[in-house]
């Protein structure tokens, strides 16, 4: 520690701290333009100049390191004069168009001039003009270089944090101009972080342009609904109409950054594809009815199927309180444990549960990745959890963390990684087994003989760890680190090898713990409340708090609180629920906020299964494919229309706030559950969001002691399970056989994440058309080129989309994003098979003409089974 005195105030700070950081700790305001906390100092704006005793010239406080005994002054006449002169120089060429500038009212230059600027300028020369009209760099970003003050925040944010390198500068001195390469942002993520950090109106949001002023907006702090990172965002509305999203640098895991989905993808709340009124099926057609008519019909039908099995499926995008109440409704009113919370896969919770209980680290991501080694397993962080990618890049570039990647698909993080181990999809378990064996073999001197024997007996085959140079380097990176964090993509759960993969993750964490690496582990979820859905017990074999349904004590606790009996046998997951439907044993199937017909593998099978249920009830905001098959459709409040909480990847529970009233005749999800329970002559208590939160805090161990008022702006962390992890190693998986031919894999893409984002008009203006990605050399061998329309064909079906060649893409793989409804991607896949063998060929001219007709050419009975306006 070193001691510094600033304006007669003294404190001790860590060595290496800057004068600016020390001043901020003392609450002393030092103005800056070019400085951002998460960026390396540039010291170009010269606004933060200070006097330091013993130095003749003023020094930039953002780039001057503290020395012991340093004495600093920040408010002398010389400093005041210098700041005023700097602002005068900026204003010399700055256009005085504040009345029409979107930044008016929240412009840092305006604020600085008011606080430190001259009252009149001595410059009389004509102002420099780069262009007479604003330049639209992309569908969402528009630029006025005349206003630029050359702080370089946007360029550095794009390169250092986002990693896109879409912005740069041309010319020098006063002629310096920020621009996109070749006048566009073709390589841009369209995240808008450059707009967020621009202190003036040089870079602006095109969708927000000229729509409102900051003082016109009613702003609401809430949580992003797209992925599990859990970014804090602030929604601005004007007279009830959605206007924009911004982020606050002082709050949230994301600080000032958001991805394109979070910043520009919330306009889906204004989508026209809303379910306006309840609907029931009459003569094979869905017709709008009143809530009372829907209730009368549903009461009769529920009574008719009462003696058959029931099942429920809820979305992991719903708030904790809604998910908790849903599983309570299914267990106490429908008397079933047949419930699940994913429409894409059925998690092997017998392995997942111990992993969550024994190793999951409920702590800030910044703290978790602060270890000197981070291993990311599976997925593509760039496209699934973009803001998490930003934080990982910070860890690598600023704190020199060693980033290790083990995945099937390439990502932008590859460029920052110390080791990239490319594995075939489905081969993650075998590769991890080899890594664990390699750790045991390479670090035998640090392990007891008994431990080595245990690892060898279960994992075996240490020679396989030497199968590639990258594998050996990954083992060395783990072995030589002081601490290790493991981040696991939840997309791996779609594989039939998911159980084996989770077992090998557990083996890896146990081996790292034995080696003294103090491992931390978190999942990278691509749904906003997947962690919350598991915690709330929306699973067939576990109650809230991840306690087994078969646990008599846990069941008795909930039965006493709910004043109802709970079935004691584990229920069916989604896969088994669909089998019950096909076998004619499913009475009422209740689907809340999710769309298995569009997401679950083998579309034809899912369609047949949903059609075979005696009574299909869909409760949703939007008219989904699954809703098109339902007998009863109930309109529910959407994002921003009801309050609650989300639990993100970190285990951080955060407040989801309401910023608009439910549209049309939609009701809050909790109100709909109460409505359905009443039809069975039962009452769900409590029924209010705040009371339900209190019950969760009483009954769910990880949430005990939490209160809504105690969550604050940054949320609060749930508690780790005190149960120690299971001892012993899982056996090694069978040898993985790489199959010949092309194999189809899927996942999220940057501009779409689930089916909410496809209802965003703004995202649809920036998103690529549906595409097929594959290796450039293989595409050339097949006689197809980038941009061609190609047919991807499997044993189940085929689709047509534009080809996107990628020189870094592994041979033998074909990637199609899962989030384009028009593609009906799950129609190509078969249950229990992933990846899916496919063929790719150029589309014939006739097929290309059909493809241009759009999704209507392949439409199923979604639109055929409805009458009137929904």
Image (cartoon, rainbow, N blue to C red):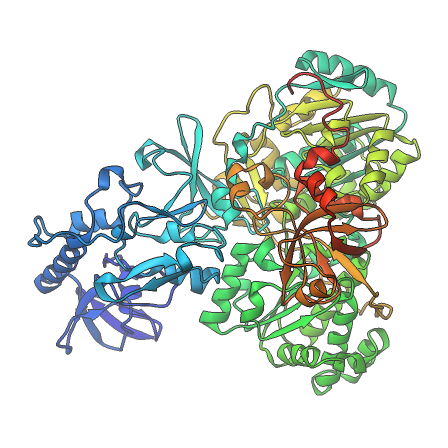
The residue lying toward the viewer, choosing from 628 and 446, is 628
Q: Residue at x 64, y 47 (%)?
A: 770
783 left or right of 528 in image: right
Q: Residue at x 58, y 77 (%)?
A: 482
Residue lying at the far right in this picture: please name it. Answer: 583
For the question of whether residue 259 can be seen, the reply is yes
244 left or right of 114 in image: right
For the question of whether residue 495 can be seen, the reply is no
Q: Quadrant of residue 5?
A: bottom left
Q: Residue at x 50, y 32 (%)?
A: 658
Q: Quadrant of residue 450?
A: bottom right
Residue 472 image position (x, y, % from top left): 69, 81
28 shown above or below 313: below
22 left or right of 615 in image: left
206 left or right of 415 in image: left
Residue 125 image position (x, y, % from top left): 10, 54
Q: Residue at x 86, y 71 (%)?
A: 735
The residue lying toward the viewer, choosing from 131 and 53, is 131
Looking at the figure, which quarter contains the N terminus? Answer: bottom left
The residue lying toward the viewer, choosing from 462 and 238, is 238
Residue lying at the far front in this picture: please name it. Answer: 845
Looking at the figure, which quarter contains the C terminus? Answer: top right
């Amino acid at each position: 520690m070193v001691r510094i005195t600033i304006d007669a105030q003294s404190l001790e700070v860590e060595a290496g701290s800057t004068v600016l950081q020390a001043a901020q700790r003392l609450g002393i305001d030092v103005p800056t333009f070019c400085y951002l906390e998460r960026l390396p100092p540039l010291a170009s704006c010269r606004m933060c100049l200070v006097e330091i005793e013993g130095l003749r010239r003023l020094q930039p406080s953002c780039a001057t390191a503290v020395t012991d005994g340093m004495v600093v002054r920040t408010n002398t006449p010389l400093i005041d004069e210098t700041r005023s002169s700097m602002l005068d120089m900026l204003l010399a060429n700055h256009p005085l168009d504040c009345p029409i500038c979107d930044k008016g009212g929240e412009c840092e230059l305006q604020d600085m001039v008011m606080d430190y600027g001259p009252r009149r300028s001595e410059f009389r020369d004509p102002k420099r003009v780069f262009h007479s009209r604003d330049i639209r760099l992309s569908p969402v970003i528009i630029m006025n270089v005349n206003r630029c003050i050359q702080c370089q925040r946007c360029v550095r944010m794009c390169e250092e944090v986002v990693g896109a390198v879409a912005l740069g500068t041309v010319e020098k001195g006063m002629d310096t101009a920020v621009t996109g390469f070749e006048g566009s942002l073709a390589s841009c993520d369209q995240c808008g972080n450059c707009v967020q950090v621009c202190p003036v109106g040089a870079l602006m949001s095109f969708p927000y342009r000229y729509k409102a002023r900051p003082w016109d907006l009613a702003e609401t702090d809430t949580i992003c609904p797209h992925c599990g990172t859990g970014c804090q965002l602030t929604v601005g509305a004007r007279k009830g109409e959605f206007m924009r999203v911004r982020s606050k640098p002082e709050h949230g895991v994301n600080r000032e950054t958001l991805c394109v989905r979070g910043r520009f993808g919330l306009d889906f709340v204004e989508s026209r594809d809303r379910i306006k009124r309840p609907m029931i099926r009459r003569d094979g057609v869905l017709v709008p009815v009143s809530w009372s008519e829907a209730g009368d019909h549903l009461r009769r039908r529920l009574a008719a199927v009462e003696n058959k099995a029931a099942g429920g499926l809820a979305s992991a995008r719903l708030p904790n309180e809604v998910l908790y109440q849903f599983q309570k409704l299914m267990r106490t009113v429908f008397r079933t444990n047949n419930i699940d919370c994913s429409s894409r896969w059925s998690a092997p919770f017998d392995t997942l549960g111990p992993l969550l209980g024994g190793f999951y680290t409920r702590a800030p991501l910044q703290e978790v990745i602060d270890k000197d080694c981070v291993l990311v397993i599976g997925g593509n962080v760039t496209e699934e959890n973009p803001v998490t990618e930003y934080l990982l890049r910070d860890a690598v570039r600023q704190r020199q963390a060693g980033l290790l990647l083990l995945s099937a698909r390439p990502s932008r993080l590859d460029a920052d990684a110390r080791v990239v181990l490319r594995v075939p999809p489905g081969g993650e378990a075998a590769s991890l087994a080899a890594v664990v064996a390699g750790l045991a073999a390479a670090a035998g001197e640090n392990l007891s003989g008994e431990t080595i024997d245990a690892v060898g007996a279960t994992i075996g085959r240490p020679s396989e760890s030497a199968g590639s140079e990258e594998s050996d380097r990954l083992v060395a990176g783990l072995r030589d680190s002081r601490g290790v964090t493991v981040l696991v993509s939840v997309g791996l759960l779609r594989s039939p090898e998911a159980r084996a993969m989770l077992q090998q993750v557990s083996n890896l964490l146990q081996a790292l713990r034995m080696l003294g690496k103090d491992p931390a582990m978190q999942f990278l979820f691509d749904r906003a409340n997947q962690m919350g859905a598991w915690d709330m017990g929306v699973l067939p074999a576990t109650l809230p708090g991840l306690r087994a349904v078969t646990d008599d004590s846990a069941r008795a606790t909930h039965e006493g609180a709910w004043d109802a009996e709970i079935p004691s046998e584990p229920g069916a997951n989604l896969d088994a629920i669909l089998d019950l439907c096909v076998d004619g044993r499913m009475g009422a199937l209740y689907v809340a906020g999710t769309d298995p017909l569009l997401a679950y593998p083998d579309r034809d099978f899912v369609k047949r299964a949903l059609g075979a249920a005696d009574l299909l009830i869909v409760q949703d905001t939007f008219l989904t494919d699954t809703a098109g098959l339902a007998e009863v459709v109930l309109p529910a409040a959407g994002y921003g229309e009801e309050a609650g909480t989300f639990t993100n990847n970190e285990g951080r529970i955060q407040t989801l706030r309401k910023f608009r009233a439910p549209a049309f005749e939609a009701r809050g999800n909790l109100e709909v559950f109460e409505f359905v329970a009443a039809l069975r002559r039962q009452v769900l208590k409590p029924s209010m969001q705040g009371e339900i939160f209190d019950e969760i805090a009483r009954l769910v161990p990880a949430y005990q002691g939490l209160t809504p008022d105690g969550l604050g702006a940054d949320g609060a962390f749930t508690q780790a399970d005190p149960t120690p992890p299971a001892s012993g190693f899982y056996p090694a998986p069978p040898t993985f056989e790489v199959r010949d031919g092309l194999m189809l894999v899927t996942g999220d893409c940057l501009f779409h994440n689930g089916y909410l984002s496809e209802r965003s008009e703004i995202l649809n203006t920036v998103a690529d058309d549906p595409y097929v990605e594959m290796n450039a050399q293989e595409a050339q061998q097949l006689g197809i080129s980038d941009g061609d329309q190609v047919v991807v064909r499997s044993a189940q079906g085929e689709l047509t989309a534009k080809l996107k060649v990628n020189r870094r893409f592994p041979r033998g793989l074909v990637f199609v994003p899962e989030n384009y409804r028009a593609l009906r991607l799950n129609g190509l896949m078969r249950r229990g098979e992933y990846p899916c063998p496919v063929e790719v060929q150029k589309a014939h001219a006739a097929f290309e003409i059909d493809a241009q007709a759009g999704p209507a050419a392949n439409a199923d009975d979604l639109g055929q089974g409805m009458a009137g306006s929904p």
